Image (tube, rainbow, N blue to C red):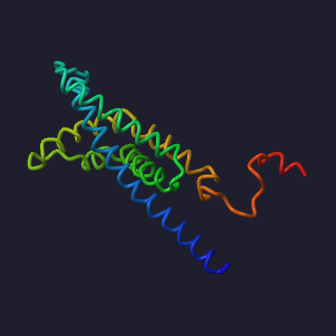
Amino acid sequence: MVAATGELEAEAVGMRHVVGLLVGLVTTAVLLLGAGWTVAEAGLVIQPGGGVAALPADERRTWTVLAVMAGTGLLLGLVAAGRVSPLAAFVPSVTLLAWTVVYALDSGRALGFVPDTPSFHQALLQSGRGMTVLLTTGVYALLGVALFVPVLLPSRWRGPGGDEGEEDDDESYWSARED
C-alpha cells in the first residue's frame, strides 16, 4: 500500500511538471504574439527616424488592446506567483533571455526571427513589429529576468503539500540552521 502511494505521488509530480511545461509554452506564445500585437496596435512602433509615433485612437480598438494587455499581464502574474510548476515560468524566461542574448551578440540574426514576410497573416505581422520594439528596448530582458526569479525559489520545486519529512512552515530556513 505504501509503495503504491509513493508511485502515485511520483506520477503526480511528473504530471505537475508536464502541465507546467505546457503552461510555459502557452505563456511564451502569449508573451511573444499577444504582447507584440498590443504594442504594435497601441501605436508604439518605432519609426525609421528613431521616434515613436502614436496612431489615431479608435475607442473600440483601444479597449481591445487594453483587454489583451490586461490578459497578458494577468497570465504573467499567475505564472510568476502560481505553484503549478517552476517550468511554467522557466520556459518563457529562458526563451526571452536567450533571444535577448542573441540580440546583444548579433542583432541581425535576432531580428531575423521576427515575422516580417507579407505572406504571413496580418495579425502575425503586426505582432512582429511589436516584438521588434519589445526586443530592442530591453523589455523582453526585463520580463525574462522577472520570470526567472521564481524558478530559483526552492519552494517552487516542491509540490503544493510539500514533503512529509520537512519541518513545519512556521520555522524559517534561517532559524533551523542556527542549531
Q: Residue at x 29, y 50 (%)?
A: 109
Figure label count: 0
Q: Residue at x 66, y 58 (%)?
A: 162
| Quadrant that contains the N terminus | bottom right
Q: Residue at x 32, y 45 (%)?
A: 30
Q: Is residue 34 above or below residue 66?
A: below
Query: Measured from the top left, where is residue 151 in percent x and y?
Result: 55, 51
Which residue in the rendered view is the most extreme toward the left? 119
Query: Measured from the top left, where is residue 62 in percent x and y?
Result: 23, 24
Which residue in the rendered view is the most extreme toward the front? 1
Query: Measured from the top left, where is residue 149 in percent x and y?
Result: 56, 45
The image quadrant of residue 76 is top left
Q: Is residue 14 left or right of residue 175?
A: left
Query: Measured from the top left, where is residue 91 in percent x and y?
Result: 43, 54
Query: Nearest the camera: 136 or 74?
Result: 74
Which residue in the rendered view is the most extreme toward the right? 179
Q: Is residue 65 left or right of residue 176?
A: left
Q: Is residue 61 left or right of residue 39?
A: left
Q: Residue at x 52, y 54 (%)?
A: 86
Q: Is residue 88 above or below residue 14?
A: above
